[in-house]
Structures are given as structure tokens and as C-alpha cells.
Image: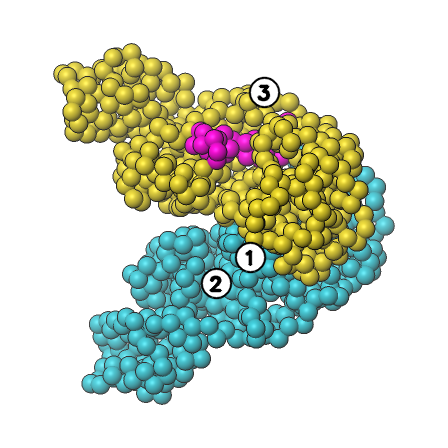
Chain colours: A yellow, B cyan
């Protein structure tokens, strides 16, 4: 590698523009720290004419990202287009085949094809870096892969989708229903083109499975992650949680057990005064637990031009400094194909249902829970609203399978006027 | 370097023992992640016979750490003895002269001799790593040096001494006076042999100046740091802060200004509901602000066997992976010798004094503040306790020099029955 490191940047949305701003504005700093002059050789995006607030006149233009990735004057291909297949995948594969390091912010690509791409990168002794794919500006990939490399990682938890956290905290702080805040977030441009990527928990689960692979030395396994979105959370749930000292967060949780790897992304109740419970708006937080280090908490902006560009540049700087590491910390050839496991550990649950207005219905519900071995810690039936009354239940610790049986039992009574939901209470 | 990396460990206190436990217990994991077998070749400590709860029988023993550092079968010298001079300094110098990488947890050594040692290391293309010297298990050196390397760092803040944070939160939670909690911390073994290293803020300032050097590309300058310990903080101060929605923390703050580098370690009031305000007990927290990344918060155990050993092993793993970086991120030859600056930025202050019981004394105090251009936001005079009445004042934002003048003015009235103190209020 020369003492100049030349980037080819594909995708000139906010993140791509942000990377170019850093390269232009912090050039002296980057050179002092890396010993390399970092330059942009060429760029690619869908629309050439668009004003992006950065001066692109010094850079060559390529319509085809794959051609950009293969250019002789590109040392590092920076993929910021997104998408799990299509041009992103083709161009990253082409870059690795052409002997170029790759830096990407593409969580979907890596969640689906991470193992194959890591294998391709490592066969050519190349970096495939993705700090920007997880939790925006928080250097969590680096912390987990390098800083905590002496630890047997025991658990990872986190709030990894700022849009969901924005929606949930906004519902709580403004007392607004889900649909209204969802529309507000949409107007503000916070939601992906397919909103289900955000509110369905898919985007956050993409991130979680990448962290799992690094933490446990396992092959990325997105299909095995259990997913539950935030679309069913009502303002009643948020208020009830708050009354009991909890907040509802879309919480990712991954841990290795005797039975295999548990990976869940689902709305949970966490204590109001815990670091996770205190998290407001679009901020992300990752909690990492290791056998030596105990618990480490990392917090920062999970998205946005500056934070995500900062993460991209952290990867670029590592490459400029001559660092090459296995993509997931452990060489891809040694990553284990581990079975997925469902959590059997008991925990308390929050259950919400609505009952029709008739004698004996509450007894039927209580019996359904008892029949499933689910013991009630607290129960509150609210006023009837028309023909229906919300019932909020907190259980004593019980097995997930028993809670599922209890939910089926509640449905079987025929007394529930809405789909009952159950949320895990996580004491962190 | 062979595919075996051999450590020579000097100092077998809790951290040294912790490192050996990781090497023994996580051997397979370390090899999978680094491609290296990590072994201990030899150890050194003051007392050979002592039972440290780890099996040392496979390792050679050296009485002299300098001899250990120079052994042919040592690739990395791990210095865990402590002390800014003496055997620690001599042995680290010897290791670098003999071509050995060095990993150390010694903040005092680096705060005083960091620039010379970094120069020596880099002349020989060696690592001198010190993740364990700052904030225990939190990988903050790595985050700042590498993950955030694309950023112009604008400010660093943090709670970096767990003992001080333990004392302050224990005073608050148990309603106990400083002297009593200090004694309790001493009994629990939380304090350094010279307690002033902790409660005087020296240990925390050692850490702060190391972070400053990385953040701003400046030569480590410990003597320039402004220090104020926690010994003057009373339970009244803590209660008054709490009533106003604040908590008192020994807060490190460093930022580069037009006039030079500001580095302060002093008790400050921070908002109760901020991440820093929520910090309990021995936990550390570092807040890093950069031009791209915005604000990143890192939190974890600041001391203890496991967390500190985790940080040491993170450094060892980097070396095992063949990574060599400048000691402070920017090559030592390019680190700038920057003048120290005192903060002139206005902020609100908390002032506490006590007044003798006589007519007109409160007017005298109020006049002393007005004469110094310090405007009062809130003032509370409490009941007289004997011949003296505590007075608690919160100012509008004012210049530090004006607050100093106000304190001198209060003293000059002759009405203060105790030394007045002023604490900065930091809105974070």
C-alpha cells in the first residue's frame, strides 16, 4: 500500500456525504494519526446531478458501483448503498475479488451473507469492516472484537434501532397513540422505505446477529433470531409499565446457552432507572457482559450523517494504519455453526388483554393462567370502555413456554376482546 | 514473532493474578481469536511465597523486574507494579531498549514520563499499550485512538476514580459525613496507600491527561492539570445539590481552546438525570465528544481484578494480532507541546459559605458577589447552628475569575465562619 489510501465511495446519501466531509475537513488530522494521506479517488450514486452539499468535482464518477469497486486507483471500496442483495452484494464481492479492502454500513448484507463474504475477504487477506452497520457512531464492533478480546462474552443486550426508541419514548412523553407517532416519525423521515424494517425489529435484529457472531465465534444466523416488533404496543402498556417503574424498549438480547444460541429482538420492560431505561429518543445503547470485564455500557447516536460517517472513517483509519483483522474477530473458517435455542430461563412477564363485560370472565382468565402454571404477582382491571375492559397482569417468574400456554388459554376462554400480548420483564 | 506470544508479568497483585487467570482459563478462545498461543514465560513480584490463588509453577521466577523485561523468551513485558518511577520505569525502559512490546496499567508512570517512553517505543517500532491505566475495563483508549480516529475531538469528560465516586454516592445514600465514609472506604481497602492519590484527584487526573494527549495530539502534560479533591465536600453540599436536581461528582474535563489546553479535575454539580448524574458507586464513565460522532458515553467498572485484567488482555491480543500503533495515536515526534489554559467560559456555580450570627452579614456577602459581577440565581440561608448559619448560593453563569474574586470578597468581609467553596455546575 502506498502512503496514500484511495477510497472509492458508492452511495452518496447522508452517510456518503458525511464521509466526504470528514476526508475534506479533517485531512491533516487523518494524516497525522494514520501516516497516510486519505483521498477519494472516485464515487458512484444513482443520480449524478443532485446537490449533496459537498464538492465532488475532484473525484471521478462511475455509474456502476462494481466498476468503481474494481478500479486500479481504489484501495478501499466504501459501500454505502444498502440492500441485502443487488448492486451492494455484487460490488462488494467484486471488490474483494479484485483485492480491495471493503468498508460498509450495510447490516442487511452482512446479516444475510456475512459468512460467505468474510470467507472471501480472509482468503485474500483483506479487511471487510462494518462498524457503521451497528449502532451508528458507537465503536461497539471494535470494543467487542478487540478491546474485550480477552473475555468469554456471556451476554449482549441493547437498544439498536433509534426509530423504535424514538417512537416509544415519544408515545410516553407526549401521551400519543402508536399510529399517530408512527405517522409523525414517517413525516420526519425517520423510517426506512419499508417501515417494517424498523418497527418490525428486522433492522435491529440484523445488528444483533452481527454482534453475536463476534461475541461467540459463531456463523451469522439471522433466520434464527426471534423477532417481535413494536406495532402492538399501546399507550396503555407504556403507562402501565411506567406506573410499575418500568419502560418498554425494543430490546435485543443474545446469549450462548447449553442448548445453543439465543437471539431475541422484542419489546421488553426494563427498570426505569437502569441505563437502558433512561435511554431517550434516537439514542442507541449496547450492554456487553464478559467473564472478566463484568458489564460495559456504550451509548451514542445510532444513526445520522456524522455518527455513521465517524464509524466508517474509524474503519478506514484502521486500514490506513495497516491493520487487518478477521471480519468477525475469529477467522471465518473457525466460526461455528451453532444451533439456535429458545430461552427457557424463567422471568416475570407483563400480560395485557381486554375482557368482555360479563360475570365470571376475570375468573376465567385467572384460571387460564393458573392452568398454565403462571402465577399472578399483580393484576389490575381498568374501567370498562364500552363493552370491553383492559386487564394488566404482572406474573411471577415463569417459563416462556408457560406464558405462551397462558396466552393460548386466555384466547380459548373466548372472553378476550382483543389479542392478548405478553412482554418479558428484564431486570438489568 | 512466533505463533506463540510469551508474556513476562511483573507485579502479581489482583491485576497480575487476573491476567494469569485469563491466560489459563480462556486459552482456546485467545488462540482462536488471535491465531497465537499466548503463554506466560516468567513472572516477578516482591514476595515469591505468597498464595495468589493461581498456579505459577509452570513459570520462571525473576526477582528483578528489569531482568524479566530483558529475557530472551519474553515477547511482551506486562508491567503491573505501579509507581511513577523506580522499578516500574526502569524495567519498562529496559524492555523497550531490548525490543519488547510493553503493556502496562501504570497511569502515574505514563502521566509523568509518557512522552519519553512513547518516543523510545516508536523508535523501535514497538507497542507501549496502557488501556488498563484508564477506566479499568472500559476500552476507552481504543475507542478514542482507533474507533473515533476520524473525529476532531472537542471535549472529554468523565468520572475516572471509582473510590471518589463511591465516597460521594455513599455519603448521599447513607446520609453520612465525609470523614466517616472515608474511613469506611479505607477499611474496605478501596484507597491507595497514599489516599490523596484518590481523594485529591491525582489518580483521576493522571488518567485525564493520557486521554487528552490522544484526543488532541498533544504531549502529556500532567503538571498543567488543575486539581481539586473531594475532601471539602460536606453532606450539606450533597443535599443542597440534590434538592436542586444535581449530584456532585469528581469530574474530569479536558478541551482544546484558542488559548491552549484546559484540563481540570474537580468536584462539579451535574444534572441528576444525566448519564454522569446517574452513576453510582465504583463505576466509571467517560463522555467523548467529537465533531462527527456527537457524544459517546462509555460506562463500566473502573477497577478490580477482572475489569483491569480484561483491559490488559485487550492490549496483549492486539499485539498477538500483529497490530502496532503509535502510543498516543499520533506519532510521538508529532505530538505538540501545547500551552495550558484556564477556562474562561462562563458557567453557573454553587457557592457555600457560613455566616456569623449578626445583623447585616448577609447583605455584606451579597454585596461581595455583586462587586465581583457575580449575579445570584438562588440563595438559601439555613438555620443558625450555634453561632453560624450555612448559606448556599447558585449563581447565574459567570466567569471563573469573577467567582474567584467573589470568594476572596466573601473572605474579606470577615463574616464567613468557614472557608467558602465554589463548585462549577456542568450541564451535560
Residue displayed at 58% across by 20% down: A339
Residue displayed at 70% across by 53% down: A58
- Judging by the rendered image, the residue that carries numbered circle 2 is B251
Q: Residue B124 carries which label?
A: none
Chain under label 3? Answer: A
From this view, report whether residue B168 is shown above or below residue A337: below
Q: Do labels 1 and 2 share a chain?
A: yes
- Judging by the rendered image, the residue that carries numbered circle 3 is A339
Circles 1 and 2, Cβ within 8 Å, touching? The answer is: no
Q: Are marks 3 and 2 on the same chain?
A: no
Circles 1 and 3, Cβ within 8 Å, touching? The answer is: no
Could you tell me which secondary element the residue under label 2 belongs to? strand
Image quadrant occupied by the N terminus of chain B: top right
Residue B142 is at least partly visible in this image? no
**In the rendered structure, which segment of residues is drawn in magenta?**
A192-220
Q: Quadrant of residue A351?
A: top left
* Residue closest to the far left: A359
Magenta part, dominant SS: helix
| Residue A131 percent across, percent down from the top left | 61, 42
- Judging by the rendered image, the residue that carries numbered circle 1 is B290
Classify residue A80 as left or right of residue A123. left
Residue displayed at 62% across by 35% down: A214
Classify residue A104 as left or right of residue A158. right
Could you tell me which secondary element the residue under label 3 belongs to? loop
Amino acid at each position: 500500500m502506498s502512503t496514500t489510501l484511495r477510497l472509492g465511495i458508492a452511495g452518496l446519501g447522508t452517510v456518503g456525504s458525511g464521509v466526504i466531509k470528514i476526508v475534506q475537513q479533517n485531512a491533516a488530522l487523518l494524516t497525522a494519526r494514520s501516516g497516510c494521506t486519505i483521498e477519494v479517488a472516485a464515487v458512484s450514486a444513482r443520480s449524478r446531478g443532485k446537490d449533496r452539499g459537498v464538492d465532488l468535482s475532484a473525484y471521478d464518477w462511475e455509474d456502476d458501483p462494481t466498476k468503481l469497486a474494481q478500479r486500479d486507483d481504489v484501495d478501499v471500496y466504501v459501500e454505502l448503498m444498502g440492500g441485502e442483495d443487488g448492486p451492494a452484494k455484487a460490488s462488494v464481492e467484486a471488490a474483494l475479488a479484485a483485492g480491495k479492502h471493503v468498508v460498509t454500513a450495510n447490516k442487511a448484507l452482512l446479516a444475510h451473507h456475512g459468512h460467505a463474504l468474510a470467507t472471501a475477504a480472509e482468503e485474500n487477506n483483506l479487511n471487510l469492516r462494518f462498524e457503521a452497520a451497528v449502532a451508528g457512531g458507537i465503536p461497539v464492533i471494535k470494543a467487542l472484537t478487540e478491546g474485550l478480546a480477552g473475555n468469554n462474552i456471556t451476554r449482549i443486550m441493547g437498544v439498536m434501532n433509534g426509530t423504535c426508541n424514538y417512537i416509544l419514548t415519544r408515545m410516553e412523553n407526549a401521551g400519543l397513540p402508536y399510529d399517530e407517532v408512527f405517522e409523525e416519525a414517517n413525516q420526519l423521515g425517520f423510517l426506512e422505505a419499508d417501515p417494517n424494517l424498523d418497527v418490525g425489529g428486522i433492522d435491529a435484529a440484523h445488528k444483533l446477529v452481527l454482534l453475536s457472531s463476534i461475541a461467540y465465534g459463531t456463523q451469522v444466523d439471522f433466520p434464527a433470531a426471534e423477532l417481535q416488533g413494536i406495532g402492538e404496543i399501546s399507550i396503555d402498556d407504556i403507562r402501565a409499565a411506567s406506573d410499575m417503574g418500568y419502560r418498554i424498549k425494543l430490546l435485543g438480547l443474545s446469549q450462548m446457552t447449553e442448548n445453543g444460541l439465543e437471539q431475541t429482538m422484542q419489546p421488553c420492560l426494563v427498570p426505569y432507572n437502569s441505563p437502558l431505561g433512561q435511554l431517550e429518543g434516537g439514542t442507541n445503547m449496547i450492554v456487553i457482559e464478559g467473564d472478566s470485564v463484568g458489564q460495559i455500557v456504550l451509548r451514542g447516536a445510532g444513526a445520522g450523517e456524522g455518527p455513521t460517517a465517524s464509524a466508517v472513517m474509524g474503519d478506514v483509519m484502521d486500514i490506513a494504519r495497516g491493520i487487518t483483522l478477521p471480519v468477525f474477530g475469529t477467522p471465518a473458517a473457525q466460526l461455528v455453526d451453532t444451533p439456535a435455542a429458545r430461552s427457557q430461563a424463567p422471568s416475570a412477564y407483563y400480560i395485557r388483554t381486554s375482557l368482555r363485560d360479563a360475570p365470571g370472565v376475570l375468573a376465567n382468565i385467572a384460571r387460564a393462567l393458573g392452568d398454565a402454571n403462571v402465577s399472578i404477582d399483580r393484576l389490575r382491571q381498568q374501567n370498562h370502555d364500552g363493552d370491553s375492559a383492559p386487564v394488566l397482569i404482572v406474573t411471577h417468574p415463569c417459563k416462556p413456554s408457560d406464558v405462551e400456554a397462558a396466552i393460548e388459554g386466555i384466547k380459548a376462554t373466548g372472553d378476550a376482546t382483543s389479542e392478548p400480548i405478553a412482554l418479558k420483564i428484564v431486570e438489568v
